[in-house]
Image (cartoon, rainbow, N blue to C red):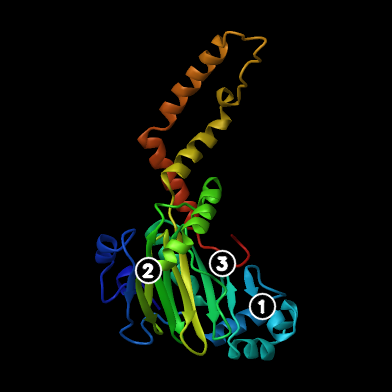
């Protein structure tokens, strides 16, 4: 089990990772041994799915490929095992509780990055991959668990996308408008084998597929607080103050706009005071503490 970031990034140190790769360029680290980063097996995944009460939240599979429904598949270890053996894809988003080692690494990353971290499980095979060329609006660390995975990375990288509702339209537009350009500009191709680590900065177009047979990997989405979100939290907290709940006066009552201007001057002064460095730093501490809290199955 991985105990710290130096073990995770070995033979590189965590300090080297942050200095040379984090938010800068992708990284592929080959495992020195199969056990170096062994965090999940197909057997553990199968047990976790079939032990659930119904279809686990966040589980995406394609039961029509085998003439079944999702509840029928997850209720039968034999049918789920055959589904894996035939190479059909499975994605389990936010798979908290899938295995102790996955939960432990999720907690380690959350604590040491001061971030919201979640594990996504990808079990794929020769029957296809569930995704096209895409980028993520958060940092990604992937651990190859079983089988091999071929990764393709593009030179194209979108500038600092965010996992924020306010940027959802812009992120979708970038995915649509730059996908063809990204597909035409290859940065590198690599094959991840069991125990290997792959890091992909947010915004970097990429894709992955099983090289042959079954493949299993876990990606850890790492979302750190953005300056926008911290400012948003500070301003939202100001709703407790009557001043921020004042309405602009009706035009008929304030035709020259003097009352509106006076109110907005007071609001601007309050915002300037609230958005100081100390307040933003306090907001960062609150958000980091909340986001780094361990998640249980069924929590976002």
Q: Is the residue 171 above or below the residue 21 in the image?
A: above
Q: Name the element at disc 3.
A: loop
**Reading the chain from its start, which is encountered first: label 1 or label 2?**
1
Q: Which mark is residue 199?
A: 2
In percent of width and height, residue 85 lies at 59, 91
User: Percent position (x, y) of residue 104?
Assistant: 46, 71
Secondary structure beneath dot 2 equals: strand
Whether residues under marks 2 and 3 lie with C-beta atoms below 8 angstroms apart, the answer is no
Query: Under tag 1, what secondary structure?
Result: loop
Image position of 120 (left or right of 148):
right
Task: State if disc 1 and disc 3 touch (CB < 8 Å).
Answer: no
Numbered mark located on residue 297 in the image? none
Q: In this view, does 66 lie to the left or right of 38?
A: right
Q: How far apart are marks 1 and 2 (CA)?
A: 28 Å
Q: Quadrant of the N terminus?
A: bottom left
To which quarter of the image does residue 7 belong? Answer: bottom left
């Amino acid at each position: 089990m991985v105990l710290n970031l130096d073990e995770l990034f070995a033979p590189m140190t965590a300090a080297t990772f942050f200095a040379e790769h984090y938010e800068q360029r992708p990284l592929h680290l080959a495992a020195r041994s199969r056990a170096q980063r062994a965090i999940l097996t197909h057997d553990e995944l199968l047990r976790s799915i079939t032990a659930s009460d119904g279809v686990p939240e966040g589980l995406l599979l394609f039961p029509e490929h085998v003439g079944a429904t999702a509840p029928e598949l997850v209720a039968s270890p034999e049918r789920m095992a055959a589904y894996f053996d035939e190479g059909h894809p499975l994605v389990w988003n936010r798979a908290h509780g899938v295995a102790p080692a996955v939960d432990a690494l999720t907690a380690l990353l959350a604590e040491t990055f001061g971030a919201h971290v979640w594990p996504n499980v990808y079990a794929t095979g020769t029957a296809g991959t569930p995704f096209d060329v895409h980028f993520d609006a958060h940092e990604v660390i992937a651990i190859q668990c079983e089988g091999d995975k071929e990764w393709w990375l593009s030179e194209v990288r979108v500038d600092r996308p965010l996992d924020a509702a306010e940027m959802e339209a812009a992120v979708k537009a970038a995915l649509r408008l730059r996908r063809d350009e990204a597909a035409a500009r290859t940065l590198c191709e690599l094959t991840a084998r069991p125990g290997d680590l792959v890091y992909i900065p947010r915004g970097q177009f990429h894709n992955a597929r099983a090289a042959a047979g079954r493949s299993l990997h876990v990606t850890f989405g790492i979302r750190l607080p953005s300056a926008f979100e911290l400012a948003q939290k500070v301003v939202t907290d100001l709703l407790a103050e009557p001043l921020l709940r004042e309405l602009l006066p009706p035009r008929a009552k304030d035709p020259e706009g003097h009352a509106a201007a006076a109110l907005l001057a007071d609001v601007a002064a309050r915002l300037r005071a609230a958005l100081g460095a100390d307040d933003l730093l306090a907001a960062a501490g609150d958000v980091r503490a909340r986001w780094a809290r361990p998640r249980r199955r069924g929590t976002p």
